[in-house]
Amino acid sequence: MAEAAIALDRYDVRPLSGALGAEIRGVDVSNLDAGGFAAVHALLLQYSAIALHGQENLTDDGLREFGTRWGKLDVHGYSRTVPGYEDVLLIYSDAKRRSAAEGWHSDVSWKEIPPKISMLHARQVPAVGGDTFFASQYRAYEDLSDAMKAFLDPLEAEHDGRNFDIDLIRRPATHPVVIRHPETSRKALYVNRGFTRRIPSLPAGESTAILDFLYNHCTRERYQARIHYEPGTLAMWDNRCVQHSAVPDFGDEVREMHRVAVSCDQRPSR
Ligand code: SIN
């Protein structure tokens, strides 16, 4: 994309940390012309996770429509959905029911082709808390020693979705431990505590030790930012270079989010 031609200054953009993330005001995703779309695309590639505040009027149809501008929508297949929409997940917590999104993960990395982008629309937010943490997997990779990078670069890891359906253990997906982002060409770590199970080319003890090291390393505070939601915030993140974790710090209050994810047209690769 020719970045020089994109007017990135048309919106109010505030970075969330030195590692990744930005919150953006002035965008209306329901009425985004080609220039506005190109600017949001460039901002997502630059910051990896963005909060587009002020989308209070976005309906589920509007969310799907905006999602479809980025590609075909992913059908998760195992999570609760908004009635009538197989591709809009309902992420809902209250005093009786907690959402399952706590814990670091990259969305649906247990599929052969995981979604490239996820979008989370805040429908009802608690008075305090309920943020989402993000961690830059570019930064986490770039900080490793050359020796560790050379060791990890050729490895592959298995991921499975046993958290959603025990049968998915039988259908693990294998992805490189280090992937190259197809749009930015930057390398990123691609293992996560939620879904990665083992590095099959290593003995079990070595696989566990390396993965434990990577899980701790790739979610260090120095790689993080958190998105704070207002009613109507639309968070978007790039699963090819970030992991995320919901923060369950809002007691018994209601938190209702609607999520769509955009399919990728290629497997994660080096
Ligand atoms: C998710 O993991 O997709 C949802 C994150 C959140 O609820 O904050």
Image: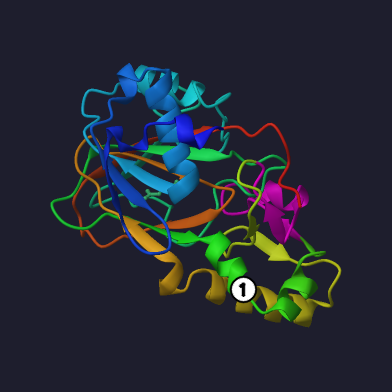
- Report the colour scheme: rainbow
Q: Amino acid at mark 1?
A: Leu
Residue 76, placed above or below residue 110: above
Res. 112 in view: yes
The image position of residue 98, as x and y in percent, is 34, 52
Q: Quadrant of the N terminus?
A: top right
Q: Residue at x 16, y 56 (%)?
A: 128
Q: Residue at x 45, y 56 (%)?
A: 244
Q: Is residue 74 left or right of residue 4?
A: right
**57 or 269: which is nearer to us?**
269
| Residue 160 is one of the magenta-drawn residues | yes
Instruction: Report helix, strand or loop for mark 1.
Output: helix
| Residue 46 is one of the magenta-drawn residues | no
Give the class, few, some or many, for how many residues have Cα within 10 Å of label 1's Cα (few <14, many ≥20): many
Q: Which residues are magenta?
A: 157-182
Q: Is residue 46 left or right of residue 110?
A: left
Q: Quadrant of residue 246?
A: bottom left
Residue 148, placed above or below residue 12: below
**101 or 37: which is nearer to us?**
37
**139 or 214: which is nearer to us?**
139
Q: Is residue 47 left or right of residue 74?
A: left
The image position of residue 216, as x and y in percent, is 54, 76
Can you identify the residue that label 1 sits on?
214
Q: Residue at x 57, y 54 (%)?
A: 163
